Amino acid sequence: MRSVLLGPLAAIVVLVGPLALPAAAADGERVVAVTAGLTVQQDGSLRVREEVVYDFGDDGHHGLERVIPVRAPHDRTHDRSYPVQDLRVESPTGAPTQVETETDGDFLDVRVGDPDSEDVRGEQTYVLTYTVPAVADARPDGSARIAWDAVGTGWQVPIDRVEVTLDAPAPLRDARCTAGDEGSTRPCDTTADAPAGASAGTTAFGETDLGEEQGVTVSATVPAGVLTPAPPILLDTFSPALAFAATPATLGGAAAVLLAGALGLLGLRRRRDPAGPGVPADVTDLPPGVVGAVAHRGARDVDVVATLLDLAQRGHLAIEEVGDGDDWSLHRRETPDPLRPAEQRLLSTVFAGGPRTSLSAVRTTARTGTQLTKEALEDDAVARGLFSARPARLALRRVGAGLLVTFAGAVATVLLALWTSAALVGVAVVVVGLVLAVVGLVTADPLTVAGAHVRARAGEFATTLTRSAAPERFTRLVPYAVALDATGAWAAGARSLHAPVPTPPWYSGRAVDGSTFNVALFAGTMGGFSASTSDALSAAPPSTAGSSSGSTYTGGGAGGGGGGSW
């Protein structure tokens, strides 16, 4: 059984039998006798001699197995180590004595015998000798206390007889022996006489007829001034106070991690100029959809509308206002003007049903194509060196990097907490990762230096409209005005011209009355067209689940399902 704490810092060493044995021993197996000789050394170590007479019965076995505890709980932050040293095994009966040892957690597994043979039968005697340091515990009065499980409660077979002798350099005081199940306080059967020739410091005990998982524990006090026991061998164990200790080393390590994270955040603000054609002298040298995407730091529906108007301006389609602007008719035209990827995607989306269509016809069918068009506009900005990456990809990349650092920090925190007292360094890594993820999401600006210049020039677009004296240029600027929400500025600039603005050849509607082109009305209709087109291109497809007709039919409701054999 396991010894109990007997006085301050009393030693607890549990010598148990094999923990990995079958639930029940084979019929006929038993321990005939255990003779344990325990000698307390001057330094508080214990020299152990175990003589085990084991009856293996008629079935063949490799030999004897002993499992010896080498580690036990001590306090909230430490375990106590009881290393087994100088282990030797002999067999007076001639049984094989090859020894294999393996430490498994808190236990030393000792296997004695031939692993290639199972010829061990009947009664065999084994003598194990070993030393365990730092067993005796010093007490305040100068004495030393020792407690030892001479027979542990891990034996899976009955034990007929136990004899224990405890020897010290001086007569022992308060010598005790208990036997039975773990936790028992029943005294042993006998306090035996010391062997012939034993010293005055020898005490003997005896016990008979132990059942399975029953043991014997002896304890005694060595008088003051006799021993100079070594301090117990303590091993650090996990505790929050220890794992997250705020020491100069851990605080310095955490500060270094936080500083590195701060430098990383500064690096997020730096922009690079990818290879590209550079910044044009005028934003109108760029496609209006790309200009809008740069101005918005990501393509929006209005940039797709601006692309559609630019295609109309270049002769790829005509736009006709229907009624009072309730709908718009679109007619595709053939022209040799080359198309960019975003423009090809947009035209194939709008005119998927043929060369003639309307906004009402494409409503709820163009959402996917519109999203792909926006991505193509962003890819165009990347190719021109205005974006470092698509905005969504950039944000995902930065958030992903931050979450990866957070995960690594969490793993590091757990490992450091389990094995060291530097878990604060791992916590600092977690903090850096979370901040990187949040800041990366909030500040994921795709603009390069060139893109920032284009965005600044786009912001000046409305003020530059009034500087142009060429009326035909105003027609060309309509897509840019829509992309930059500057149709009002476009109309004001057109009215300030000394010559009339020509009617756009791709437009027909209320703003044209014979040969008269109403610039202000046209600007208003373009605002309406932009809103209607954005709504039509981004509208979600109608849900097909359920029915609002009120009719009842099989398979027409929620739930259900089915099954069958398989």
Image: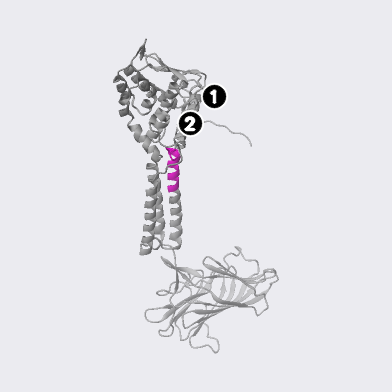
Q: Nearer the viewer, mark 1 or mark 2?
A: 2
User: Residue 125 at what x, y percent from top left?
Assistant: 64, 77
* Residue under numbered circle 2: 372
Question: On the rendered image, what quadrant is the C terminus found in?
Answer: top right
User: Residue 20 at what x, y percent from top left?
Assistant: 58, 64
Residues under numbered marks 1 and 2 in contact, where contact means CB atoms less than 8 Å apart: no
Q: CA distance from mark 1 to mark 2?
A: 38 Å
User: Residue 519 at what x, y percent from top left?
Assistant: 33, 18
Q: Nearer the viewer, residue 378 or 283?
A: 283
Is the stretch drawn in magenta largely helix, strand or loop?
Answer: helix
Inspect this view and state whether residue 431 appears: no
Mark with earlier residue (1, 2)? 2
Q: Relative to 439, is 152 on the left or the right?
A: right
In this rendering, is residue 16 above or below 340?
Answer: below
Is residue 277 magenta-colored? Answer: no
Inspect this view and state whether residue 408 appears: yes
Is residue 393 magenta-colored? Answer: yes
Q: Which residues are magenta?
A: 385-402
* Residue under numbered circle 1: 554
Q: Secondary structure at mark 2?
A: helix
Q: Nearer the viewer, residue 50 or 365?
A: 365
